[in-house]
Amino acid sequence: MKLSTRGRYGLRACYYLAENYYEGYTSVSDIAKELSLSENYLEQLIRILKQNDIIASIRGAKGGYRLNKKPSDITVGEILRLLEGDFTTAVCAGDESICDNRQCQARNVFSKIDIAINKAVDSITLEDMLNDED
């Protein structure tokens, strides 16, 4: 399983906003410049995150974007699912109607992997990422 640029860039942007949580609002152009990302692409990702209450915005000269909740209240899983969709290693593991073979050991393994991945990303908050800096 590989994350797309949507997931990677979106998580990086949220991490940047977590780093600057107490500094106020930040413009998309500043975020894009700091992270060396396309401003247009970043705007698309921020729009998704804003629509799902991860990011808040304000207009005006001192406007921009910031996290809508504290970094400790936003998980990596929450961000990645909004941008990537559900985490699943195989279609059959996430949707039993695809395959009705209940004896399939491969599906059982895929399901266990899915559970472990989801548990891992749901256990990491943006605050955890901030505190994990070396």
Image (cartoon, rainbow, N blue to C red):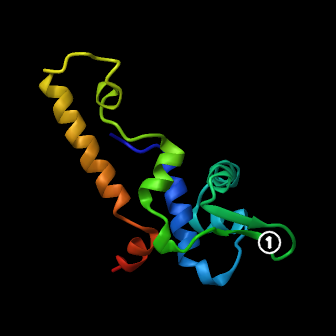
Q: Residues within 10 Å of mark 1 (few under 14, many from 20)?
A: few
**At numbered mark 1, what does the secondary structure look like: helix, strand or loop?**
loop
Q: Which residue is mark 1?
A: 63
Which residue: 44% across, 62% down?
75
Task: Give whichever of 37, 111 is nearer the camera.
Answer: 111
Q: Quadrant of the N terminus?
A: top left
**Please, which residue is most extreme toward the bottom here?**
22
Q: Quadrant of residue 100?
A: top left
Tell me which amino acid carries mark 1: Gly
Which residue: 33% across, 49% down?
118
Q: Position of residue 47 (x, y in %)?
A: 69, 51
Q: Quadrant of the C terminus?
A: bottom left
In the displayed structure, 38 sits above or below 59; it is above
Q: Quadrant of residue 2?
A: top left
Q: Quadrant of residue 92?
A: top left
> How many marks do you count on the picture?
1
Residue 11 seen by the camera: yes
Q: Could you tell whether 14 is left or right of 24 in the image?
A: left
Which residue: 81% across, 77% down?
62
Which residue: 35% across, 19% down?
97
In the displayed structure, 95 sits above or below 86; it is above
Q: Position of residue 37 (x, y in %)?
A: 60, 56
Residue 32 seen by the camera: no
Q: Could you tell whether 108 is left or right of 28 in the image?
A: left
Q: Position of residue 52 (x, y in %)?
A: 62, 53
